[in-house]
Every structure is written in C-alpha cells, then in structure tokens.
Amino acid sequence: MTQLDTAPLVRFAPSPTGYLHLGNARPALLNALFARRYGGRFLLRLDDTDRERSTEAFAEAIAEDLAWLGIVPDLRARQSERAAIHDAAAERLKALGRLYPAYETQEELERRRRRQLGRGLPPIYDRAALELTEAQRAALEAEGRTPHWRFKLEPRTVTWQDLVRGEAHVDCASLSDPVLIRADGSYLYTLPSVVDDAEMGITHVIRGEDHVTNTGVQIQIFEALGAATPVFGHHNLLTTAEGEGLSKRLGHLSLRGLREAGYEPASVRALAVLTGSAEAVRPVASLDELAGLVDLAHISRAPAKFDPGELDGLNARLVHAMPFAEARDRLLAMGVSGSQAEPFWVAVQANLGKVSEAADWWRVVAGPVTPAIADPDFIAAAAGLLPSEPWDGETWKAWTTAVKAGTGAKGKGLFMPLRLALTGLEHGPDLSDLLPLIGRDRAARRLAGETA
C-alpha cells in the first residue's frame, strides 16, 4: 500500500447492545492500525440508536475492551446525540424524492415475496408504494397505518476500488429499496452511518465483507446528499475452524472473557488481525510493529478461520518472551516477595501459559505445600545432606551430587522423589532455580514431612 495523500480519519461504530468479541476486535484493530500506520486518527462512534437494547453499561464495557487492546480513540461520538443532523438529512432526501413512504405490513411484504418466488422472480420490493395516490395514502393513515420510509435506488451498478478486494461492484437493480426509517420513526443503521461519516469527514471505512452490499446502497446515499464518498475496504470475517461465525449476543470469545481468563492483549491482537492475512500468526508485542505488518491489500478473500487453541500457544510464546519489568506489578499483586520477584519470574516463566499461572508456582515457593514422600529413608538421608546457606543456582547440583554419592540413587530415582517432597508435584520449573527461592528452612521442613 502506498503512502496516502492525506492523514486518514477512520471509525469503529459498534452498538452498545452487548460485549465485544474477538470478531469485533478485528475491524476495531484494523481501523486503529490503519490510522497508526498512516498518521491518522481513530473515532469511536457508538451506534446507540437502538433505544431498547443499548445500555450505558455496554458502552462503558466497549471503551474498557478497546483500552485493554491498546486502542485509545482520538475522538468519541454517540449517534443518539446527533438525531437533529439525521433528521435534516432525511428531510433533504424526501425533498429530492429519494426517500418515500411505504405502508405495507411485514405480513403483506412476506406474501408478495412468496408470490414473486413462485413466479420465478427475484423477491425484491415492487415499489407499489410509489403508485399510491394522495387519497390512498390518506386512507391508509386513517386506518392507523404509519409509513416506514424507503430509499429509492437508481437501477445501476455501483463500483468502487476496495482497499482489500480491489475493484468491487454491486448491482443495485437487483436490490429492494432499503428501509431507512421504521414506522415508529427510528432509524435503521444505514442512514445515520452515512450522514455521520459524511458530516464527520471519515476518509476510509474499513469493515467486514458482510457490508459489501450495504456499500452499494450507501454510496448512492452519499451521492444523493452531495457528500464526498469515503474509500471502502471490506475484510474477511473471523470464524471458528468449522466456519461458525462469532456472535456478540452469545458471548463467543468475548474480549471481557478473554481478559478475565488471563490472556495477554497482544496475543488477542495478533490472532484477531493476522489470521487470514499474508502474515503468519505470531506474537507481536507492540501496536507499532503490528501496524507495520498489516496491509489491507494482503488480506485474504477466504474466510479467516482460527482454532481457539491457537490463542493458548500465542499467549504462551508471548509470556515466555516477556521482560520481568512488564510482569513485575502483576507478580507483586499476587503476593510475590519484592526481593524475590525477578529470580522467581526467571525460574517459572518458561512453565507459564499465562502470567496469572505464576500465582500457582508462588504457592509452591511460599507454601504451604504438602510433601509427597514415598521413601522416607531416602528423603531423610537427603535431608541430612542439605547444604548450608547461602543458596544460589549451583546449590541444587551440589546437593543432588552429594545425595547421589551418599545413597546410590540416580536419574529419575534421584530427582523425582526430591521434587515430590519439595513441591508436591511431579513436574515444574527447574529446581536449580526454584530451590533458592524455597529456602533451606522450608526445604528442611518439607523433607521432614511437614506441610510448609
């Protein structure tokens, strides 16, 4: 992708009707990274015109989830606060004859669609409302019917150069005139989105490929309003390996849930944007680095399928490479001793899939641990050979060498009983790192069979 002529202004416009999930993270991040890559700005615009389902709690959760991903919006807006601007645009379209009233009920429209299908015709709206006389409209309103309002599409093919798909087009002659205003006077998504994009100066609209058909319609609305049309880019959607789409309402892989489960935002970011692109999915620690990797022109047209298990591997790789300074505050919050925090991190880091798992290993260090002792005589002999302090990274080797010489034990028969007595576990971090953290007093008490 070449350098842009002007700094872009992009937007992410979620509805505050549920928690964001991994699929929502994809367009949010692609927009934020695009702005970062080209020195632009990112707008968070809440599409909160659904009065019944939109809540302040979900609005706050969206901001929290974006912040967790590292996205700090340059601008914020709420569509519910812009009703006057939307109303003015609607009136303008009515005056132009592009927005017209229709009175059919859902049942009537469904019967018409079935008839058209039965005759082998496409089930698109027949524009019967345009044939109504003033008297007929008045009669319908006298019955108590309130019109919904449809946008009159020009029967032509709309084309654009898509940032992801290249040359794209939609044959608007094959579409029904879309409803822009419901019978109760509330707006559907389409009109407020176009009006706000135009009025706010959005330069690039980057969103999922499920909006391709909408784009043909929206370009006609931009043109009818005499507004500049932004550049569009439609990326593939994240799906499970089985091709199942993600649902905000069902809570599939919600960002809140992933955060609470202990995943790193960097691993979620990498999975969300590198899946289905030309780049291998791998840990990428910084947003700047990720922005340099993501090129919309190199996103695949095929579905972006992923295995949730990939996230575990990504997260583990990130944690294994994480500097102590990045983990320090979280370790201290777990109760890890400040003086031991760095050597503890070095000792356990390679055994972690998530930073939160370090708490389990700190309990092994600080106790209480119930030792597992199958051969008391061997353990007693080993206890008698415990070196004096101070202990360091060489203590384990010196001690086990002495135990081997004193008892004749070797290999697994030497190391496993000592690990079980000291940690109560058959596996774990290298004891040459762990033993100095446990300390001689706790080690001696565990070797004596005490819970310590």
Image (cartoon, rainbow, N blue to C red):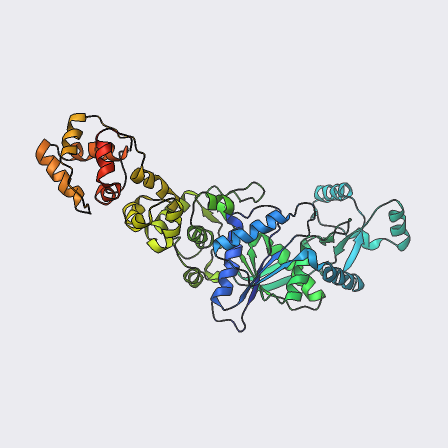
Percent x, y of residue 22: 50, 48
Q: Residue at x 55, y 68 (%)?
A: 8
Percent x, y of residue 383: 17, 33
Residue 382 horizontal side relative to residue 369, left or right: left
Percent x, y of residue 194: 66, 61
Q: Residue 63: tell me if it is visible.
A: yes
Establish if 214 lies above or below 118: below
Establish if 226 lies above or below 137: below
Residue 142 horizontal side relative to residue 100, left or right: right
Please name whichever residue, 348 or 48, is drawn nearer the observer in this view of the structure. 348
Percent x, y of residue 103: 81, 48
Please name whichever residue, 73 or 1, is drawn nearer the observer in this view of the structure. 73
Q: Can you say which quadrant of the picture contains the C terminus?
A: top left
Q: Quadrant of residue 438?
A: top left
Q: Residue at x 78, y 64 (%)?
A: 96
Establish if 8 lies above or below 322: below
Q: How many marks?
A: 0
Q: Residue 172: tell me if it is visible.
A: no
Please name whichever residue, 223 or 257, is drawn nearer the observer in this view of the structure. 257
Q: Quadrant of residue 119?
A: top right
Establish if 142 lies above or below 72: above
Please name whichever residue, 229 or 386, is drawn nearer the observer in this view of the structure. 386
Q: Residue furthest bottom?
A: 5
Q: Residue at x 21, y 25 (%)?
A: 374
